[in-house]
């Protein structure tokens, strides 16, 4: 009998993300009922909430992504959380609460946005130069 709750990890871009960027939600087993509305976002004081695109199932039931678009001209951090028991495995066990993931971002236009992780690294190096 399966009594173990599915674990959830959240990950994003390396370094400073540019506008837009992808955040990935990975469960350690297949789950159902996970929705974009389950994602809790917090931003630095003075910043606006970013726009979230639709949840995309990359590996059906296991890996999901969402496109995050911060408000143009803002910089800072965005945290992503998912509470416990919002998605469930085949046995009906609710997921564990995710560890908060914090993504630094810069949508100020201080440097040209890259594409994906490689572009984000290039941007960070350009910013530091």
Image (tube, rainbow, N blue to C red):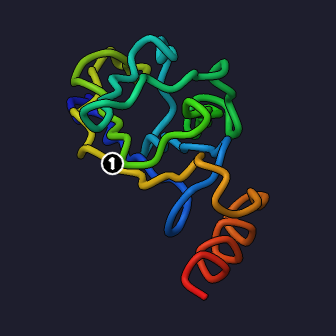
Camera-side residue of 108 and 99: 108
Judging from the image, what secondary structure is the residue with disc 1 in? strand
The spot of residue 61 in percent (x, y) is 58, 29
* Left or right placement of residue 13 versus residue 114 in this view: left
User: In which quadrant of the rendered view does residue 91 lie?
Assistant: top left
The spot of residue 89 in percent (x, y) is 40, 23
The spot of residue 12 in percent (x, y) is 51, 53
Residue at numbered disc 1: 101
* Left or right placement of residue 63 versus residue 10 in this view: right
* Left or right placement of residue 98 versus residue 58 in this view: left
Q: Is residue 12 above or below residue 66?
A: below
User: In which quadrant of the rendered view does residue 37 lie?
Assistant: top left
- Residue at 51% across / 32% down in the picture? 30
Please state, as top left, top right, bottom left or bottom right, where the N terminus lies in the image: top left
Q: How many marks?
A: 1
Question: Residue most toward the bottom?
Answer: 129
- Residue at 54% across / 52% down in the picture? 106
Camera-side residue of 57 and 100: 100
Camera-side residue of 50 and 31: 50
């Amino acid at each position: 009998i399966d009594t173990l709750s599915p674990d959830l990890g959240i990950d994003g871009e390396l370094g400073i993300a540019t506008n837009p960027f992808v955040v990935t939600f990975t469960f350690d087993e297949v789950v159902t009922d996970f929705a974009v509305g389950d994602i809790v976002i917090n931003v630095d004081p003075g910043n606006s909430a970013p726009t979230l695109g639709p949840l995309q199932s990359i590996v059906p039931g296991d890996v999901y992504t969402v496109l995050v678009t911060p408000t143009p001209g803002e910089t800072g951090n965005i945290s992503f959380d998912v509470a416990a028991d919002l998605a469930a495995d085949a046995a009906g066990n609710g997921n564990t609460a995710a560890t908060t993931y914090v993504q630094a971002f810069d949508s100020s236009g201080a440097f040209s946005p890259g594409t994906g992780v490689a572009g984000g690294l290039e941007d960070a190096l350009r910013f530091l130069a």
